[in-house]
Image (tube, rainbow, N blue to C red):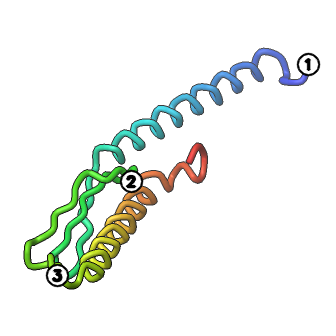
Amino acid sequence: MGKFGGFGGMGNMQQLMKQAQKMQQDMLAAQEELANTEVVGTSGGSMVEVTMTCDKKLVGISIKPEAVDPDDVEMLEDLVVAAVNDALSQADAVKEEKMGAFGNIGL
């Protein structure tokens, strides 16, 4: 009979392989969705906005003119950092929501 109990064991193995393939396809689809989903992080009352995809690719930065003070560049740098961190937090939340079902497989 062997390890898998004859042909019945092979059917179970085949079913497991199909389930693994479907899970891989679902995970790839979720990763593609993350790459196409954008979040916007803001700071300074939306004086600085950072747009990024949920796979953490920076798409754009928008800075309102009133945020630019040549005598206080450090404030603008802080606003950019805060907006990027806000976008990263949002991207992480969306990723956790979409990929949470897969655990840490392939992440």
Residue 13 occupies quadrant: top right
In this view, the residue farthest toward the right is 2
Give the mark, 1 or 2, whose residue is nearer the N terminus. Answer: 1
**At label 3, which amino acid type do we have?**
Gly
Foreground tag (3 vs 1): 3
Which badge, 3 or 2, comes first in the chain's sequence? 3
- SS label for mark 3: loop
Are the two marked residues, 1 and 2, in contact with CB atoms closer than 8 angstroms?
no
> For the residues marked 3 and 2, what is the alpha-carbon distance in whole angstroms?
23 Å
The residue depicted at 24 percent of the width and 58 percent of the height is: 51
Classed neighbour count for the residue bearing mark 3: other residues with Cα under 10 Å, few (<14), some (14–19), many (≥20)? few
Q: Please give the residue where the numbered disc 3 appears in the rendered image.
A: 45
Which residue is located at x 16 percent, y 75 percent?
A: 46
Q: Front-most of 89 and 16?
A: 89
Q: Earlier in the sequence, mark 3 or mark 1?
A: 1
Q: Residue at x 38, y 53 (%)?
A: 56
**Disc 2 residue type?**
Lys
The residue indicated by pointer 1 is 2
Residue of label 2: 56
Q: Position of residue 14 (x, y in %)?
A: 66, 22
Give the residue at the far left of this rendering. Answer: 65
> Left or right: 47 with respect to 99?
left
Q: Amino acid at mark 1?
A: Gly
- Mark 3 and mark 2 in contact? Answer it, CB < 8 Å: no
Decide which of 10, 44 is in the foreground and name it: 44
